[in-house]
Amino acid sequence: DAMVIQNPRYQVTQFGKPVTLSCSQTLNHNVMYWYQQKSSQAPKLLFHYYDKDFNNEADTPDNFQSRRPNTSFCFLDIRSPGLGDAAMYLCATSIRLAGSYEQYFGPGTRLTVT
Amino acid sequence: QQPVQSPQAVILREGEDAVINCSSSKALYSVHWYRQKHGEAPVFLMILLKGGEQKGHEKISASFNEKKQQSSLYLTASQLSYSGTYFCGPEGAEYGNKLVFGAGTILRVKS
């Protein structure tokens, strides 16, 4: 059974046209993350939520926003996608136990910008 | 600053062994290891929490030397299913208490 679900799996958007990617989880984990992964690179953390607390990485462009309306759902909004935003976007969840945790990744959404 | 992984890529024949190293310039309190197959999401392999700790997952094991700020992943008697990109994710206060993935090591196992 899928534990971290991302929709859609593939998204094509036009340059400058806002797009929203969604993530849901059935694990009831308190931490959710959004990563951007470009070809042949490591996943790069954009932001994460620790419960309702939002943590933005210093180098995440303002063009990227996120919402977490409840424990199960998290959204990534790209307000004005540029060609450089084409990438795989990975959602992950974790729960902190005894000072450590493992991250469960969703299958990712591959974003194409035309 | 991203941790350094070596080698960048390695090709093995089935049954051969490999070691992937992860080195950090910052103090660590844990190291995560993930494997990602092409077109798929990263999958958690293991966490090492203490200096000198070793863990295992199937025929994959790892060590963590807290003092040297290094971790190594050992793949023994490699199988075709081991092919993929391996990422280390050190964790420490100087990394902002979050995972910062290394650049990855591409492992290809041939029959």
Image: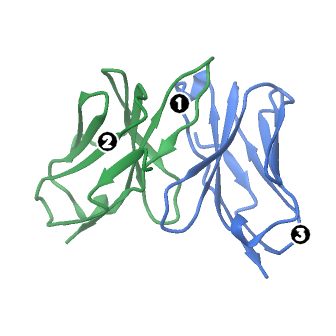
Chain colours: A green, B blue
From the image, tell me which residue sits under label 3.
B16
Q: Nearer the viewer, mark 2 or mark 1?
A: 2
Q: Which quadrant of the figure contains the C terminus of chain A? A: bottom left
Give the amino acid type for the residue marked by disc 2 in the picture.
Ser
Secondary structure of the residue carrying tag 1 is: loop
In the image as oriented, which residue stretches furthest toward the front? A1
Please give the residue where the numbered disc 2 appears in the rendered image: A24
Residue closest to the far top = A98
Q: Is residue B90 above or below residue A12?
A: above
Tell which circle, 1 or 3, labels the residue nearer the N-terminal end.
3
Q: Give left or right: position of B101 versus B16.
A: left
Residue that badge 1 annotates:
B98
Residue B43 in sight: yes
Q: CA distance from mark 3 to mark 2?
A: 40 Å
Nearer the viewer's eye, disc 3 or disc 2? Answer: 2
Say which element carries label 2. Answer: strand
Q: Are marks 2 and 1 on the same chain?
A: no
Identify which residue is drawn at 42% across, 28% down. Answer: A31
Marks 1/3 in contact by CB < 8 Å: the verdict is no
- The x, y position of residue A88, in whole percent, is 38, 59
- Residue at 59% of width from left, 25% of height from top? B94
Residue type, label 3: Glu
